[in-house]
Image (cartoon, rainbow, N blue to C red):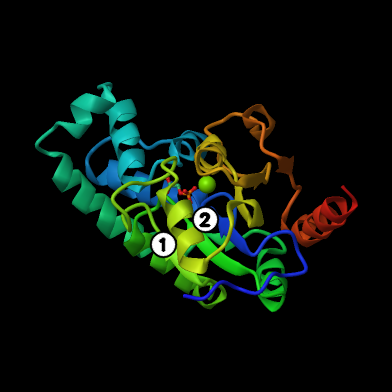
Amino acid sequence: MSAPARTALPFDLMLFDLDGTLVETAPEIADAVNDTLTELGLQPATLEQVTRWIGHGTRELLVQALAARQGRSADAVRGDAGFAAAEAVFQRHYEARCGTRSRPYPHVVEALQALRAEGVRLVVVTNKEARYTARVLQAHALESLFDRVISGDTLPVKKPNPLAVTDSLLRFGVERSRALLVGDSSIDVTTARHAGIAVWCVPYGYNMGEPIEACAPDRVIADFGALMPAALQAAVTAVGS
Ligand SMILES: O=C(O)COP(=O)(O)O
Ligand SMILES: [Mg+2]
């Protein structure tokens, strides 16, 4: 694929985390977790607990939920012969819940449309498994805004491994210095650091209960309404330096 023309912004490629960055998904994930726990005869979890378990993909989230509710270690749950059956129950419930209570965060759609109009390549990089990613994006008519969607099981490794980023740099012919990852967690910051690209974070997402500032992203933006102004300001700073 040919390299994109340089945009007026400092970035020709922007990669976006999904859960907690583009879309508020915790309420419907919590619904699916609690449908599953109830069906398995276990006590439900709170929204706060489920929110802290988001980040390493929904399979790992289910491991954490079962470990907490059964008083076992995560390793014991993963190694349990019955885990596949629990996963099938979760899959059924989460597919039914996807898109019911999730919402794109304020200004996300307008910001993505504005970036596309500038010619920036846009990629989703999420640890959520592809079957659910597709449903969430479809439910909110977001898929057509992206040039590529990379889920937790699209490549052999997931974040914080930087492969999704480095593979996108190659595919779109973009230099590291012209790419930005926008995320909400330490996993996103580490992914960007491993890939050698800039990382900006939103403070409202799911960072396993920690404030995002503790992860030292290059910039914290209040929301997607601040994304384009911050990028334009970074362009001015780059020209001035
Ligand atoms: O599904 C998860 O656990 C996390 O997904 P994210 O990478 O989009 O935040
Ligand atoms: Mg996230």
Q: Residues within 10 Å of mark 2 (few under 14, many from 20)?
A: many
Farthest left residue? 81
- Judged from the image, the secondary structure of the residue bearing numbered disc 2 is loop
109 in relation to 216, above or below: below
x 87%, y 56%: residue: 236
The spot of residue 174 in percent (x, y) is 57, 62
Q: Along the horizontal axis of the image, is 37 left or right of 119?
A: left
x 64%, y 69%: residue: 120
x 23%, y 26%: residue: 75
Identify residue type, mark 1: Thr
The spot of residue 217 in percent (x, y) is 66, 37
Question: Sequence order check: which comes first, mark 2 or mark 1?
Answer: 2
| Ligand 1 lies under 8 Å from the Cβ of mark 2 | yes
124 in relation to 158, above or below: below
The spot of residue 67 in percent (x, y) is 29, 28
Which residue has dot 2 on it?
Answer: 18
